[in-house]
Amino acid sequence: MPLVRRSHEIWRELEAATGENLLFQCGGLIFGSTRSTNAAHGIEDFLQSTIDVARTHAVGHEILDAAELGRRFPQFKFDIDDIGYYEPEAGFLKPEGCLRAQLSEAQRMGATISTGNRVKAWHQHSGMVRLETDRGDYEAKQVLFAAGPWVSELVPQLSPYARAYRQVLYWFEQEGNAATFSPDKMPVYIRLPDAENEMFYGFPLIGSQSSGLKIAGEQFDLACNPGELERKVSETEIAAMFAKAAPKLRIRNQCLRAVTCQYTVTPDYQFLVDRLPGSDSVWVASPCSGHGFKHSAAVGEAVAELMMSGVTSYDMGQFGWRFPH
Ligand SMILES: Cc1cc2nc3c(=O)[nH]c(=O)nc-3n(C[C@H](O)[C@H](O)[C@H](O)COP(=O)(O)OP(=O)(O)OC[C@H]3O[C@@H](n4cnc5c(N)ncnc54)[C@H](O)[C@@H]3O)c2cc1C
């Protein structure tokens, strides 16, 4: 929670500094059947855990029954035994804008940014770290590897634990008036799994009215090699996503776009932010197990504090190195 709250502050600070709109607090809805255990993302009862965290940290929320859900959110189709957790301050970020804002502010404050530079190898010697890249070598006292799905190429000790999984994102045409699906009327949401259906999540209509509703599921059965990700989305995958989402969400059987990306997941679905075992100067901040972007502003601040001074005001203990090496 401290990371969430600080990240919200930083996104707003970056908006003020750059004039970009980054954080859209359209509300967030987590819903599922009262008959199911609601296990998701490595957490046995995702709904109850969310409620417990909200109560402990005084996060504003409402618990809604099926009748109230149906009245407030006509974009969805609820079952009679559905229950929902609604958080008015939840929402979505525009990641491209967030990255632009972070980079331009870093540069304004004196950072040197070098992109398109691939690290091929690294070595530690006499208190320094030497990076060999395809555009020359660098030496630094402290190095942080945040290479997402490729982290195991730079930190081979992680390869049994940081596994990449192919995920697919779909945009389906909404059913009915586009205005009903705009962010001022529709929240971001997670539909929790039950005996018949797997979890899926999605967004209101962002951008133009014809851009479609972004929907995605998660799969952790087939790990992939980040360099060899199958980018093509098959008709079978599209049909399966529609079959999963259409009973719960007002969409037409018209997929406007589908793309792939990768989750890099640890065995406990948590983050890894720590020094490499046995090193004073090499750090790793990755992988984020598919839910890291929204926290990245505060995680970045914590890592910067740790690397500069060895301490941070955040409790990062649970994200420490916890794998055999
Ligand atoms: C489908 C999908 C949905 C997601 N949804 C959410 C969500 O709803 N909420 C949320 O908070 N998070 C979400 N995430 C997770 C979030 O996107 C990641 O946690 C976040 O992007 C991780 O950031 P990162 O900087 O660690 O890695 P990345 O964003 O993967 O960046 C890694 C960078 O390292 C570079 N790199 C790799 N190897 C090398 C090398 N050898 N040398 C130099 N550079 C290298 C890459 O080019 C890349 O730029 C989602 C992820 C996916 C795939």
Image (cartoon, helix red, strand yellow):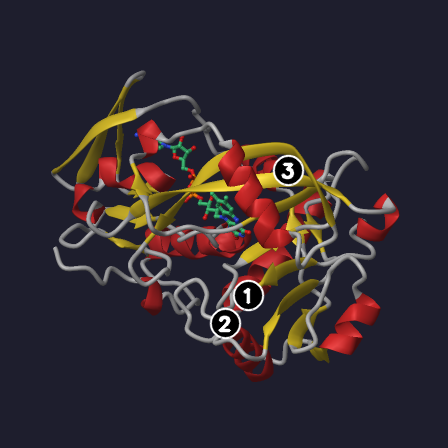
What distance separates the C-alpha of mark 3 from that of mark 1? 29 Å
Is there a contact, CB below 8 Å, between mark 3 and mark 2?
no
The answer for how far apart the CA atoms under marks 1 and 2 are is: 6 Å
- Circle on res. 192: 1
Query: Which is nearer the N-term, disc 1 or disc 2?
Result: 2
Q: Any atom of ligand 1 within 8 Å of the CB at mark 1?
A: no
Distance in Å between CA atoms under marks 3 and 2: 33 Å
Find out if the beta carbon at label 2 lies less than 8 Å from the nearest ligand 1 atom.
no
Q: Which amino acid does label 1 sit on?
A: Leu
Query: Residue beneath label 2, please?
Result: 38
Mark 3 sits near ligand 1, with its Cβ under 8 Å away: no
Q: What element carries label 3?
A: helix
- Going by the numbered disc 3, the residue's amino acid type is Gly
Q: Which amino acid does label 2 sit on?
A: Asn
Q: Nearer the viewer, residue 90 or 135?
A: 90
Q: Is mark 2 on a helix, strand or loop?
A: loop
Of the two numbered discs 3 and 1 in the rendering, the one whose residue sits closer to the viewer: 1
Nearer to us: label 3 or label 2: 2
Label for residue 7? none
Residue under label 3: 97
Q: Tell me whether the residue at label 1 lies in contact with that at label 2, contact meaning CB atoms closer than 8 angstroms.
A: yes
Please tell me whether residue 122 is drawn above or below residue 272 in the rendered image: above
The mark that comes first in sequence, 3 or 1, is 3
